[in-house]
Amino acid sequence: MNQIKKLLIIGFVWPEPKSSAAGGRMMQLISIFKQNGFEITFASAAQDSDFMVDLSEFGVIKKSIELNSSSFDDFVAELYPDVVLFDRFMIEEQFGWRVIEKCPGAIRILDTEDLHCLRTARQKAFKENRNFEISDLLSEEVAKREIASILRCDLSLIISEFEMNILKNVFRINADLLFYLPFLVDEMKEEELLKLPSFDERKSFVFIGNFLHEPNWNTVQYLKEAVWPLVKKDFPEAVLEVYGAYPSQKVLQLHQPKNGFYIMGRAEDANEIVKKARVILAPIRFGAGLKGKLLEAMQCGTPSVTTSVGSEAMHSVLPWNGFVEDNPAEFAQKAIALYQDENLWKQSQKNGIEIINICYQTSNYADSLISMVNELLENSENHRLHNFMGNLLQHHAYKSTMYMSKWIEAKNK
């Protein structure tokens, strides 16, 4: 009889699948491991939130932990997991050395969410009013930390093929350390569109996104200042509803009903909001990873207009479920056309289904991930032996991280 394998997930925050794509991604990972017989403990040093998922409903044990505290050492030594999954590189930096010290045999997996260094470099180039260049990544401080974290782990989950190429070709990461895992959803049949609200039953343009995420706030600013005036000029009755968790005061100040620009705040059920919208607008100017809001729009049969950054690595060579446009004037015109032309709208819906079924099928990736994890569990020693750079970074970097953490703990006593 096979022994039940233990998975410890160390979360940056507690999962909020209704607030962010990152929360949805984490629940997808939990589902895959749970279905494959893993006993899962989710630990985090984050504060509880009103919107976090009840992990017990999914058969997951919840454990609050502390930063810079040897109490974690006792906890992880007692649990003694077979696999540890770090939610973003900052968590690996904080807890990775402790895991190695107390559970040296545990397989260490990093879920990057997206490449933070790519998002940071793009944001910096944007603020400097210049085009982003791939070479910008090489001078990014965040890149040095993030790549070191990837090298120290046995496997890193990468959400975007564009980012896979960066890691392999720019940073020269060994492919054996990387696993491409996009968002995962169930197959969708064209007949399912008939169960969704029709063209005539839908109204309004909609943007939706968590405002703790800087690219989302920038997108709403850009919509308000550059895109929406152009839409209203040729389509005076147009209405845009902006939804998002954790809106700041500067977001709320953009509310302008007389101009058809509504700040709606948190969506109680984002799925229902998107289903009732006619068109999603997402003129994203910087960021990384995949855009959960745009995949959700496809699932809801809602066409979208976005930018090349927004659609990056999301649709292979398939036609978008709407339009991809970087020029604000063209963006506005395509948005109006998509909103008003029912035939164009319906074809865009069908494009979205094709993208879902070809690019995001759970069945295409879940079994391969578990096979990879099981292979690592059986051959971790050989796998680590061939990751010399990871061993080197582990040897040197963890010494400094370890002593800094111990100093903070002593100082706090």
Image (cartoon, rainbow, N blue to C red):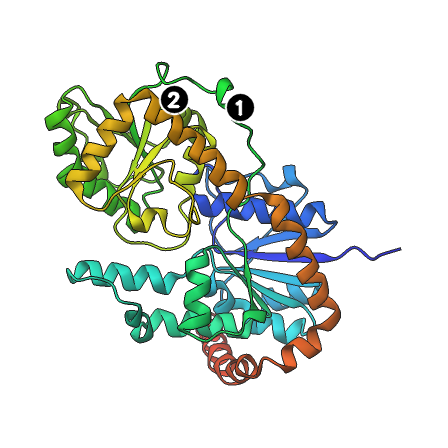
Rendered location of residue 311, percent (x, y): 36, 47
The answer to whether one can see residue 250 in this image is no
User: Is residue 244 shown left or right of residue 332?
Assistant: right
Residue at 27 percent of width and 25 percent of height: 339
Residue at 32 percent of width and 29 percent of height: 279
Tell me the amino acid under the disc marked 2.
Lys
State the residue position of label 2.
276
Residue at 35 percent of width and 14 percent of height: 200
Rendered location of residue 178, percent (x, y): 54, 66
| Residue at the extreme right | 1
Mark number displayed over residue 192 = 1
Q: Look at the numbered disc 2 and give the secondary structure of its residue.
A: helix
- Residue placed most toward the observer, 45 or 377: 377
Tell me the amino acid under the disc marked 1.
Glu
- Examine the rendered structure and indicate whether residue 394 appears above or below residue 78: below
Q: Earlier in the sequence, mark 1 or mark 2?
A: 1
Residue at 55 percent of width and 40 percent of height: 185
Please rate how many residues cluster around mark 2, counting C-alpha atoms within 10 Å: few if below 14, some from 14 to 19, many from 20. many
Rendered location of residue 201, percent (x, y): 37, 14
Rendered location of residue 101, percent (x, y): 63, 76
- Residue placed most toward the observer, 1 or 41: 1
- Residue placed most toward the observer, 340 or 291: 340
